[in-house]
Image (cartoon, rainbow, N blue to C red):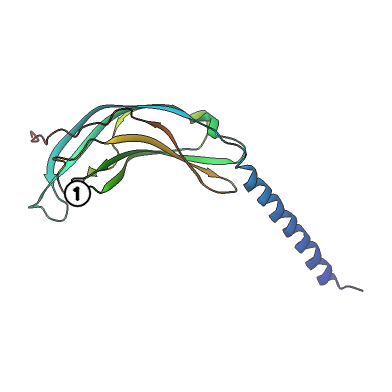
Amino acid sequence: MHSIVSRVNNVSALLSSCMMALLAAIALSSFVFTADPKGDISIASVKVYPTNARRYPHRKQDMAFVNFNISADLTPLFNWNTKQLFLYLEAEYNNTKGVQNEVVIWDRIVRRKEDANINVVGKNKYMFRDVSHKFKNVPPAHYSLKYNVMPYVGVLTYGEAGRTTEPVEFPPAQPRVS
């Protein structure tokens, strides 16, 4: 009849086929669970200071510091297939040459549903500077709270939880007082 190796091969092929079908069903079921989380963003202040560029100390470059308040309920995004959320605050603006810029200025990883109620009063975590070295004559920026749902199995899902209603102006650069 069949050898023991042949039988083990047939059983493992059947089990791996069943496992792949189960994983495909789990991945497809993540499209069924859609959530619409709500968040609120308010920008307390934006300050621009001239600093020295990193590679060229003789060249000045403007750096923006943003103070913000975030409150969001992201618990609807958690289900049995959610591993973690990547949450980030993004500034969207056009520079003086008309190029669309999207800059991440703050982020957080949320791993548990219990930590999904976000209330943050803070400032930007990452340097916020423009390629043109100046924020002078740059149109106002919109700020948005975006998320990325990372499932155990399936496709990454991106979305937006909140956005500022009014664009926020960049003030003129202030000299730093030491």
Q: Amino acid at mark 1?
A: Lys
Please state the horizontal and vertical placement of residue 118, each as a whole percent of the image.
43, 28
Measuring 71% from the left and 53% from the top, which residue is drawn there?
A: 21
Q: Dividing the image into 4 quarters, which one contains the C terminus? A: top left
Dot 1 lies on which element?
A: loop
Q: Dividing the image into 4 quarters, which one contains the N terminus? A: bottom right
Which residue in the structure is indicated by mark 1? 97
Measuring 64% from the left and 43% from the top, which residue is drawn there?
A: 29
Residue situated furthest front in the rendering: 98
Q: Is residue 95 left or right of residue 148?
A: left
Give the vertical position of 123 relative to 25 (above or below).
above
Q: How many marks?
A: 1
Please state the horizontal and vertical placement of residue 12, each as a whole percent of the image.
76, 62
Please state the horizontal and vertical placement of residue 92, each as a whole percent of the image.
30, 40
The answer to which quarter of the image holds residue 67 is top left
| Front residue of this view, candidates 80 and 145 | 145
Measuring 60% from the left and 41% from the top, which residue is drawn there?
A: 81
